[in-house]
Structure formats: structure tokens, C-alpha cells
């Protein structure tokens, strides 16, 4: 039953990956991408022991949980629930985006990832938690670190830019 229930997810994931790659490389044929991705996934599933799955899930959590903290802080706490869409498309950027990249967000995100991995460790690779007494898991601490750090530094940057702009006026 489990195999039948989960089979559609595998097909959807492979197809979604093929479509995403085709968006980046439109000359590639979808049929070839689907077959290639299926082959790669089959080999990886065959070779990677299931015991490594926990570390894989921890790595996914370490990437996306602090990213959500940065996004929540940026949108709600720093920018007051609104974005200047035109700033996202400027090549020269502004004080947030340099070359289209929010470097403050990247740095804070990396700190959040480091926090997550320090709290959780990667047991399958023999890397123990640096904080074994922490019982809340790694998601809440890394989310909190990313959210608070981005909110504080982002607010300081916003205030200093506004102060400088008012001095120039």
C-alpha cells in the first residue's frame, strides 16, 4: 500500500525537476530530462544507504528554516509588509540589493544554517550536536537567530540610510 501511495509523488517530483531544468535550458527535450533524472535518482537511491536519510532531512531543514526566518524578518519587520518591486529589477541595486542579491540576507541565512547544524549535528556522518542539552530541536533556535539577527541589522541599516538621505535633502 505504501509503495502504491507514494508512487505518484515520485513521478511528480521527477516531472517537476525536468520542467525546472527545462526552464533554465529550454533547448533540452523534456522526455530526455525525465529519463535522465529518473536514472540519476535510481542510482542515488540504490547507492545511498537509508541511514543517511536523517542527515539529508537535517540538511534540508538547515537550509529552509533559517531562510524562512530571514524572509519573515525582511518582509514584516524590516519593510513593514511591503516591497518596492522596481528595486528588485534594478541592475545597480540599492542599499539592500547589490547586483540583484541581498547580501545581508545571505550572510544572516548562513549564520542561521550554522546555528541549525550546531544544534542538530549530523548523526549519520558522526557529527554530534554542539548543544546536546537543547531539547527543542534545531528549527526554533535557527529560525529565531535568523529572524532576530536580520531584523536588528536590517532595522539599523534602514535607519542609517534614512538618516543619511534626510541629511542630503
Image (tube, rainbow, N blue to C red):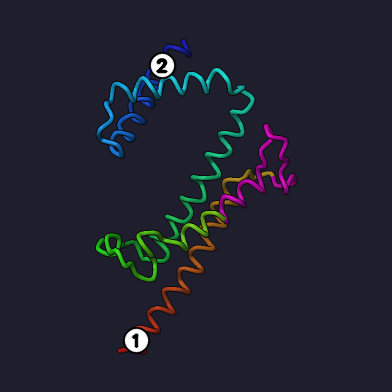
Q: Is residue 98 above or below residue 55?
A: below
Q: Is residue 102 above or below residue 139?
A: below
Residue at the (46%, 23%) spot, across then down: 40
**Residue 121 on the magenta segment:** yes
Question: How would you rate the neighbour count of disc 1 (Cα within 10 Å): few for under 14, some for 14-19, many for 20 or more?
Answer: few
Residue 30 or residue 68, whichever sits in front = 30
> Could you tell whether 132 is left or right of 71 in the image?
right
Q: Is residue 23 above or below residue 116?
A: above
> Could you tell whether 61 is left or right of 115 in the image?
left
Quarter location, residue 120: top right
Residue 169 or residue 81, whichever sits in front = 169
Q: Position of residue 49 (x, y in %)?
A: 62, 22
Residue 34 or residue 159, whichever sits in front = 34
**Residue 158 on the magenta segment:** no
What residue is shown with label 2? Answer: 7
- Rendered-image quadrant of the C terminus: bottom left
> Could you tell whether 37 is left or right of 143 in the image?
left
Q: Is residue 132 above or below residue 74?
A: above
Residue at the (67%, 32%) spot, across then down: 124
Quarter location, residue 50: top right
| Secondary structure type for disc 1 | helix
Question: How would you rate the neighbour count of disc 2 (Cα within 10 Å): few for under 14, some for 14-19, many for 20 or more?
Answer: few
Magenta region: 111-134
What residue is shown with label 1? Answer: 166
Residue at the (33%, 34%) spot, across then down: 21
Amino acid at each position: 500500500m505504501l509503495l502504491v501511495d507514494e508512487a505518484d509523488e515520485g513521478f511528480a517530483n521527477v516531472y517537476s525537476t525536468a520542467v525546472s531544468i527545462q526552464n533554465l535550458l529550454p533547448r533540452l527535450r523534456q522526455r530526455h530530462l525525465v529519463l535522465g533524472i529518473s536514472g540519476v535518482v535510481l542510482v542515488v537511491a540504490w547507492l545511498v544507504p537509508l541511514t543517511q536519510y536523517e542527515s539529508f532531512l537535517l540538511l534540508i531543514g538547515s537550509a529552509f528554516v533559517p531562510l524562512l526566518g530571514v524572509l519573515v524578518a525582511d518582509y514584516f519587520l524590516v519593510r513593514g509588509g511591503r516591497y518596492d518591486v522596481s528595486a528588485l529589477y534594478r541592475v545597480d541595486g540599492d542599499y539592500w540589493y547589490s547586483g540583484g542579491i541581498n547580501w545581508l540576507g545571505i550572510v544572516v541565512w548562513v549564520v542561521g544554517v550554522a546555528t541549525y547544524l550546531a544544534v542538530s549535528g549530523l548523526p549519520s556522518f558522526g557529527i554530534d550536536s554542539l548543544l546536546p542539552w537543547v531539547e527543542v530541536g534545531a528549527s526554533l533556535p535557527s529560525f529565531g537567530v535568523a529572524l532576530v539577527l536580520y531584523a536588528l541589522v536590517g532595522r539599523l541599516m534602514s535607519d542609517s540610510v534614512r538618516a543619511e538621505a534626510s541629511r542630503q535633502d
